[in-house]
Image (cartoon, rainbow, N blue to C red):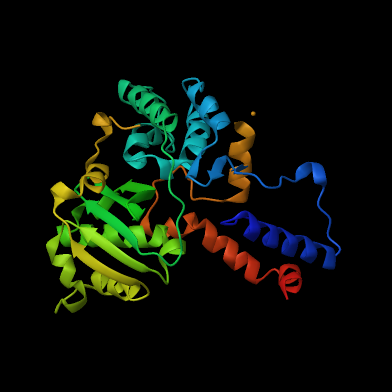
Amino acid sequence: MYSRSQEEHATHLRLVLEKLREQKLFAKLSKCSFWQREMGFLGHIVSAEGVSVDPAKIEAIRDWPRPSSATEIRSFLGLAGYYRRFVKGFATMAQPMTKLTGKDVPFVWSAECEESFSQLKEMLTTTPVLALPEPGKPYMVYTDASGIGLGCVLMQEGRVIAYASRQWQGSERNRPTHDLELGAVIFALKIWRSYLLGETVQVFTDHKSLQHIFTQPMMNARQTRWVEFLADYQVNINYHPGKANLVADALSRRRYDSAVERDVESLVGEISTLRLCAISQEPLGLEAVDQADLLSRIRVAQQSDQSLLDATE
């Protein structure tokens, strides 16, 4: 639990301990930590400044040897993918290695793979501290799409909360520019649904016609479906010139061969078992993004947990 002041924290702590006592539940003192200014949680360090990667995991990534099989690539990408929210352009940066994990693909470690591996390690060992979202305050989402893929950035009061990007797959590349740009907006709203649903959201895109998507006279079936999805959000779409939208633009245009951005086995196994985020060998599609919604999963599970419901009554 966290609080905004010592007095508030004392109140929160007393309420939690009283609830535990009422339900005859016990916490082992040696496993508890009280009055901490920062805490480790599932490979992250959470503090008043925000969320950062656990230094122990950074060391493990930095010392990770070059993969020599598809299985070892999956193991590395499993850990690296857990921290993808900290890395600009993660999807395109990892693509050369991801290709080698496909079925019946010969394992040939190329210079492109070596660059991908080195760049990912560099980026993951120099990750920024991301801000913690504050419910009730407006969010800003910057999106951009190109023929290569999409990129988006979630911000609040000028601070970055998360980055996200992915490449277009198959026939997606053949979609008109209008649909690619709208698809980037939909991707961002889906992957950050737990933050944005019910909140005021300002979306900024460099595709001017998206400002009029709600009054567009003619739409294809895909656009109609996406506009219905947008209706669930308190969202305003604003035009933002590409030159002013540098981060999202860079994420969407990063190419495989020009990326210039930046005990572990047990952790990867634990993450895989808990399914805390959508990490798979295949590229992440729009339909699968909801799997990344950790907070949404927790809320759904809590609503059906009878013992928890009884304890909070």
Q: Is residue 180 above or below residue 81?
A: below
Q: Residue at x 72, y 68 (%)?
A: 308
Confirm whether residue 141 shows in the render.
yes
- Give percent across and percent down for residue 120: 39, 30
At x 81% / y 52%, what residue is drawn? Answer: 27
- Say whether residue 176 is visible: no
Left or right, residue 96 beside residue 174: right
Residue closest to the far front: 7
| Residue positioned 44% across, 38% down in the render | 103
Horizontal arrangement in the rendering, residue 129 relative to residue 186 (left or right) = right
Residue 14 point in image, percent of width and height: 74, 61
Nearer to the camera, 241 or 66: 241
Image quadrant holding the C terminus, namely bottom right
Count of numbered circles on the image: 0
On screen, residue 124 versus residue 174, left or right, reads right
The vertical placement of 186 against 121, above or below, is: below
Point out the image quarter for the N terminus: bottom right
Please determine whether, in this image, residue 34 is positioned above or below residue 69. below
Task: Say left or right for 140 vs 287.
Answer: left
Q: Identify which residue, 28 or 14, lies in the foreground.
A: 14
Q: Foreground: 292 or 200?
A: 200
For image coordinates 47% across by 41% down, the residue present is 83
Query: Where residue 186 sits in the image (x, y, percent)?
Result: 32, 62
- Quadrant of the rendered image containing residue 189: bottom left
